[in-house]
Image (tube, rainbow, N blue to C red):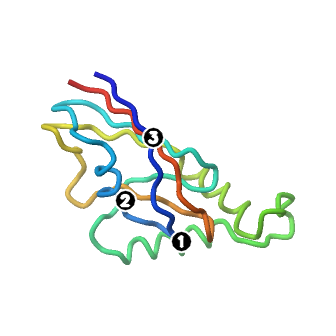
């Protein structure tokens, strides 16, 4: 069985956002055993798996990334779309556009403290399109 759906995440401000529940709401029933692939169709946002309990982790992640890739560097050439755009592209490249998560017994087989993150690197990124492909039996 292979099933694919495309959906749009609700718009969020810049930051790291736990979206596990929103993703699951768009998937329907999961296979007993399989694999979920998520792919974000944007170059200034990314998907990741990380801490799902303490919101301080999400705030710290934003601070880390903002220190790694700073805005308004004088050597940026791509500046027409605002000071957050080029850094957003670089951050999205560091994290990546896709995830693969195992499905076991009809549920995502994430660790106890793991959740799916939207890494929104633009100040006003808008709704983000995600393609979900479920493979399984």
Closer to the camera, 57 or 129? 129
Residue at point 45%, 76% (across, down): 59
Gap between marks 3 and 2 measured at Cα: 15 Å
Residue 45, x across and y down, in percent:
57, 56
- How crowded pointer 1 is (Cα within 10 Å; few <14, some 14-19, many 20+) is rated as some
Per the image, label 2 sits on a secondary structure element best described as: loop
Instruction: Answer above or below: position of 16 versus 91.
Output: below
Among all residues in the image, which is located at the extreme top? Answer: 1
Residue at point 48%, 41% (across, down): 39
Quadrant of the rendering where the C terminus is positioned: top left
Residue at point 62%, 65% (across, down): 122
Q: Earlier in the sequence, mark 2 or mark 1?
A: 1
Q: Are marks 3 and 2 in contact (CB under 8 Å)?
A: no
Residue 131, x across and y down, in percent:
46, 40
Q: Please tell me the numbered disc located at residue 13.
A: 1
Per the image, label 1 sits on a secondary structure element best described as: strand
Given this view, does label 3 or label 2 mark the residue nearer the observer?
3
> What residue did someone put label 3 on?
6
Per the image, label 3 sits on a secondary structure element best described as: strand
- How crowded pointer 3 is (Cα within 10 Å; few <14, some 14-19, many 20+) is rated as some
Gap between marks 2 and 1 measured at Cα: 13 Å
Asked whether, in this view, residue 65 is left or right of residue 18, the answer is right
Residue 117, x across and y down, in percent:
41, 58
Asked whether, in this view, residue 61 is left or right of residue 42, the answer is left
> What residue did someone put label 2 on?
19
Q: Earlier in the sequence, mark 1 or mark 3?
A: 3
Quadrant of the image occupied by residue 75? bottom right
Quadrant of the rendering where the N terminus is positioned: top left
Q: Earlier in the sequence, mark 3 or mark 2?
A: 3
Residue 108, x across and y down, in percent:
23, 45
Residue at point 58%, 52% (across, down): 94
Asked whether, in this view, residue 127 is left or right of residue 44, the answer is left
């Amino acid at each position: 069985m292979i099933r694919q759906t495309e959906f749009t995440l609700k718009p969020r401000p810049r930051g790291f956002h736990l979206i596990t529940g929103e993703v699951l709401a768009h998937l329907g029933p999961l296979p007993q055993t399989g694999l979920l692939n998520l792919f974000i169709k944007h170059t200034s946002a990314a998907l990741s798996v990380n801490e799902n309990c303490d919101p301080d982790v999400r705030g710290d992640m934003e601070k880390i990334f903002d220190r790694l890739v700073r805005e308004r560097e004088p050597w940026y050439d791509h500046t027409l779309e605002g000071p957050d755009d080029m850094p957003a592209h670089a951050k999205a490249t560091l994290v990546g556009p896709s995830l693969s998560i195992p499905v076991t017994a009809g549920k995502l087989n994430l660790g106890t403290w793991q959740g799916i993150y939207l890494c929104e690197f633009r100040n006003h990124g808008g709704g983000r399109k995600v393609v979900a492909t479920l493979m399984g039996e």
